[in-house]
Every structure is written in structure tokens, then in C-alpha cells.
Amino acid sequence: MTLDANEPVFNQPWEAQAFALVIGLYEKGAFTWNEWADVLSKTIHSDNGNAAYYELWLVALETIVLKKSLANEIEILERKSDWQKALLATPHGEPIELKTARKS
């Protein structure tokens, strides 16, 4: 598969953010690249083919964060709720920012 010169690498900003989170956690030593590859591979292979690639990336990120005790399930659910509130509070066409959820 080749990338067209005008084709974006990420379809949505959240995909780039999820990618950056994984890279940042890896660079800080939260997990090895082999650990990440293993979790991502298992996540992709357990999917029934309905999820998009970066949706699986996000599931794998949540999985490794829990596995490595970087956050617990409640913290992850709270963060998801914050993002949902930010989404609902953001005017159409504007970038969604987590600080928007905390204002409401």
C-alpha cells in the first residue's frame, strides 16, 4: 500500500493523538516496543473486521495502559466521559479540546 501525496496519514485528529500517546509512553519507558506490538497484534486478530485500524489502536492503548497499571478502568472511563463532554460542547467544525469538557 502506498500513500498518495495528498492523502492524510490520519483521517481524524484523534488518530494522530492516539498514535502520539503510544509513542510518548514508549519513549518514557512505560512499555517496550515488543510489548506494544504484541498487544496491538492480539487486538487486531481478535477483531471481527468491523473496527477501523485506529479504533483498534485505541483499544490496544487502553489494554496496555491497564496491563501496565498506568491508569485504572475508572480513570479511563472518566477520561472517555471528559472527551464526550468536550465533543458535545464544541461547535461544529472546531477542534475538540479536552479543556472544553472541564469548563462545562
Image (cartoon, grey):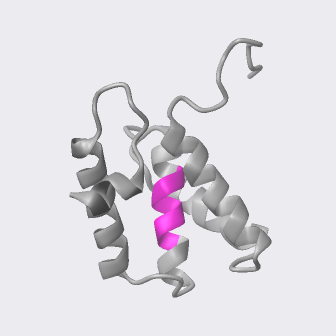
First to last magenta residue range? 57-63
Magenta region includes residue 73:
no
Coordinates of residue 59 in the picture (x, y in percent): 45, 59
Tell me what residue is drawn at x 47 percent, y 67 percent.
Answer: 62
Magenta region includes residue 61:
yes
Tell me what residue is drawn at x 22 percent, y 43 percent.
Answer: 88
Using the rendered image of the protein, determine whether residue 37 is visible from the camera's viewpoint. no
Q: Quadrant of residue 74?
A: bottom left
Q: Quadrant of residue 80?
A: bottom left
Coordinates of residue 29 in the picture (x, y in percent): 76, 79
User: Which of these two is toward me, 47 or 35?
Assistant: 35
User: How would you classify the magenta stretch by its main secondary structure?
Assistant: helix
Q: Is residue 83 left or right of residue 29?
A: left
Image height check: is 19 above or below 68?
Answer: above
Coordinates of residue 56 in the picture (x, y in percent): 48, 50
Using the rendered image of the protein, determine whether residue 60 is visible from the camera's viewpoint. yes
